[in-house]
Amino acid sequence: MKHTLVLLPVWALLASLGSCGQSQVPSDPTMQMTDLPLTSVDVPAGREVATFGAGCFWCVEAVFQSLRGVDRVVSGYSGGPVRNPSYKEVCSGRTGHAEVVQITFDPAVISFADLLEVFFETHDPTTLNRQGADEGTQYRSAIFVHSEEQQRLAELARKAANESGNWSDPVVTEITPFANFYAAEDYHQDYFNLNGEQPYCQMVVRPKVEKFRKRFRDKLKQG
């Protein structure tokens, strides 16, 4: 059995007002978060969903796919007012979307707090609209929260990351109520596993995945 999780406008408005001034990056500066088109998320019974932006989704997908308790990771686009954007449109930086992964996970095996720990330790949350050589609002560090509890935990994790001393600059990760998700084109899905020998994967994705595997070896799937 599945249940459908839909953004509730009342809590979304309250949560966005309480986001501590973190940057929102819609393509139109007059666009409010409550004006974004809404999409629903089908969540299997006993499962939860998380939506993270942490730079190129090829890297982020490869990291979260490896975690025990994660059932599914889908690369896509969230946070902009354009419906069903293409990769080319998102890469223009004018749609307001971030490249994200949407993660379906078993909270009895891995918690949302665990996912947040991986999120903050596998990208640089202090570089605004950039990860490494990838630059633009589509590469921003973002957590699109699906509930008040996710909002609370995300804010605690961001505060902890800011106080950790791991970075010399302040954390700029935005925490925004989830509004929409559009799956990316088929060729973006499972990208690292299918294209691991390509230069970008060898130079960027593989080193990140190897570092992650060493740091979180106790949370990895077996085999």
Image (cartoon, rainbow, N blue to C red):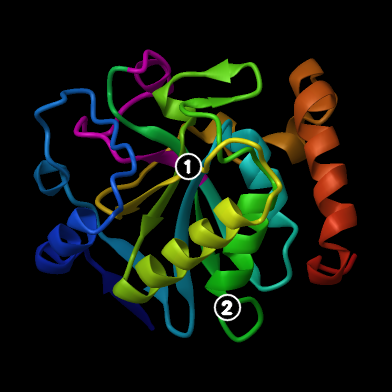
Q: Position of residue 177 (x, y in %)?
A: 28, 56
Name the foreground residue: 109 vs 71. 109
Instruction: Answer above or below: position of 53 versus 20.
Output: above
Left or right position of 148 against 128: left
The magenta stretch is 75-93
Left or right, 212 with reference to 168:
right
Looking at the image, tell me whether mark 1 or mark 2 is earlier in sequence order: 1
The residue positioned 32% from the left and 37% from the top of the image is 23
Q: Quadrant of residue 93?
A: top left
Screen quadrant of the C terminus:
bottom right
| Residue 105 versus residue 198 in the image, above or below | below
Is 104 colored magenta in this rendering? no
Crowding near pointer 2: few (<14 within 10 Å), some, many (20+)?
Answer: some
What is the quadrant of residue 192 in the picture? top right
Residue 91 in magenta stretch: yes
Residue 100's label in the rendered image is: 1
Residue 71: tell me if it is visible.
Answer: no
Q: Nearer the viewer, residue 107 or 4?
A: 107
- Type of amino acid at the residue the image marks with label 1: Val
Q: Between residues 173 and 5, which one lies in front from this camera angle? A: 173
Distance between the alpha carbons at the discs numbered 1 and 2: 19 Å
Q: Are marks 1 and 2 in contact (CB under 8 Å)?
A: no
How far from the left and from the top, in percent, is residue 129?
46, 26
Three-letter amino acid code at the position of disc 2:
Asp
Image point 87% across, 44% down: which residue?
Answer: 210
Residue located beneath label 2 in the image: 106
x%, y% of residue 127? Answer: 55, 30
For image coordinates 58% across by 35% down, the residue present is: 169
Task: Name the side, left or right, on which 208 lies relative to 139.
Answer: right
Secondary element at tag 1: strand
